[in-house]
């Protein structure tokens, strides 16, 4: 089997790093691009040497495309992916997998029925930082994990984003936007979530666009912008996660926004929105934080690594680490936070994926 032929739908800000990495990985080849703005798609194709410039519908059925990389806006992630699957294509979605639970369930079921692979961002947990943290947990460097605290707290994106509307519509908000990084990291370290309780609110009814042609325009907030989750894991660990677009300043450590507490020590975990970062451990008999030696590759921005792993999975050489099943579990957890807040009840999750396997140590990509 040759390189996995990838077609990219949606040429936005995030697409540049995907082009860079998927062109560099020997297991993947970008063969087509599509966007509602064909001029933008053509510019990207010329810049990255991609042969086909197509409409989205053309790309989803093109015979040269093996896998559709779905970089569209979140509200259409599910619909675009399901069309791709209907046309016999493997799929890798940007996060979240979908914004509606029924879409996510149908997407996974339809792919399974056709024998197709589904993957989903984030794949940051496959990088050097979180894989080193995973090895530290597996080696018992902090004993048995008891609990974890995680927080993504700050103000929303409207001061710098010229079109921030979708962040404040149903399917947006800080949990669906940033929660995938934090929850995926926690599931990677602690295993799947059994049940959760949540609280949510929208502190500000309106937001003001702070840049671009729409500067000064008001946006109505239609989704919670501060969400707190208490997570009960099948492993016995308990964690809490806060995501906020409401706080003027972040009071957590951006470089280590996740802390895992164990029976024999504490571990600071690097930013799950990145691939690198230092892992720090303090034993119960130690005063100082000690860096853990990096054990894995991909410390730089390696977005697209999850697509590469699908290519290797199809060759029988690797698991599909950033799988649709994992992404569906994370999506169910995120949607359940607001459900719990509305009902005042714990929500038991219906999904129970396997804890993602650890990546092999120090496996470099061929030059």
Image: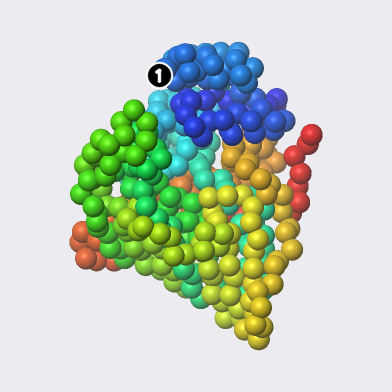
Instruction: Where is residue 218? Give x, y as percent.
Output: 23, 39
Q: Is residue 99 visible?
A: no
The one nearer the camera, 194 or 28, is 28
Q: How is the image coloured?
A: rainbow
Would you say 211 lies left or right of 309 here? Answer: left
Q: Residue at x 44, y 20 (%)?
A: 35
Quadrant location of the C terminus? top right
Give the secondary structure at mark 1: loop
Would you say 1 lies left or right of 350 here? Answer: right
Disc tally is: 1
212 lies above or below 227: above
The extreme bottom residue here reads 285
The one nearer the camera, 196 or 267, is 267
Q: Residue at x 62, y 43 (%)?
A: 301
Instruction: Where is residue 153? Give x, y as percent.
Output: 41, 58
30 lies above or below 107: above
The one nearer the camera, 138 or 362, is 362
Q: Residue at x 57, y 50 (%)?
A: 274
Instruction: Where is residue 58? Give x, y as percent.
Output: 45, 14
Instruction: Where is residue 184? Give x, y as percent.
Output: 50, 54
Would you name the residue on which mark 1 appears?
36
Quadrant location of the N terminus? top right
The one nearer the camera, 281 or 62, is 281
The extreme right residue here reads 367
User: How dense is the environment of label 1, judged by Cα within 10 Å: few (below 14), some, or many (20 and up)?
Assistant: some
Would you say 87 lies left or right of 343 here? Answer: right
Q: Residue at x 36, y 57 (%)?
A: 248
313 lies above or below 55: below
């Amino acid at each position: 089997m040759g390189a996995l032929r990838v077609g990219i739908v949606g040429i936005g800000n995030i697409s540049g790093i995907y082009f860079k990495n998927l062109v560099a990985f020997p297991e993947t080849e970008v063969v087509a691009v599509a966007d509602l703005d064909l001029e933008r798609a053509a510019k990207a194709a010329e810049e990255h040497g991609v042969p086909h410039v197509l409409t989205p519908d053309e790309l989803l059925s093109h015979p040269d495309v093996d896998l559709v990389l779905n970089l569209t806006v979140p509200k259409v992630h599910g619909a675009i992916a399901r069309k791709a699957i209907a046309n016999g294509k493997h799929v890798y979605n940007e996060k979240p997998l979908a914004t509606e639970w029924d879409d996510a369930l149908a997407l996974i079921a339809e792919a399974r029925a056709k024998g197709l692979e589904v993957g989903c961002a984030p794949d940051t947990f496959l990088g050097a930082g979180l894989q080193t943290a995973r090895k530290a947990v597996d080696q018992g460097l902090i004993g048995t994990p008891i609990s974890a605290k995680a927080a993504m707290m700050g103000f929303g994106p409207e001061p710098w984003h010229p079109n921030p509307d979708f962040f404040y519509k149903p399917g947006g908000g800080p949990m669906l936007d940033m929660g995938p990084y934090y929850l995926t990291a926690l599931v990677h370290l602690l295993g799947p979530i059994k049940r959760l309780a949540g609280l949510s609110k929208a502190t500000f009814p309106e937001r003001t666009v702070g840049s671009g042609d729409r500067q000064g325009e008001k946006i109505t907030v239609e989704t919670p912008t501060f969400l707190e989750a208490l997570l009960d894991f099948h492993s016995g660990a308990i964690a809490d996660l806060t995501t906020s677009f409401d706080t003027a300043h972040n009071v957590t450590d951006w470089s280590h926004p996740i802390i895992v507490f164990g029976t024999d020590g504490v571990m600071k975990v690097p930013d799950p929105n990145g691939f690198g970062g230092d892992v720090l451990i303090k034993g119960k008999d130690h005063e100082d934080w000690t860096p853990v030696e990096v054990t894995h590759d991909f410390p730089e921005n390696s977005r697209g690594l999850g697509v590469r792993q699908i290519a290797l999975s199809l060759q029988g050489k690797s698991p599909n680490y950033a799988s649709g099943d994992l992404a569906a579990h994370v999506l169910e957890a995120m949607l359940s936070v607001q459900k719990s807040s509305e009902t005042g009840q714990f929500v038991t999750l219906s999904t129970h994926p396997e804890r993602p396997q650890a990546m092999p140590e120090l496996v470099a990509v061929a030059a």
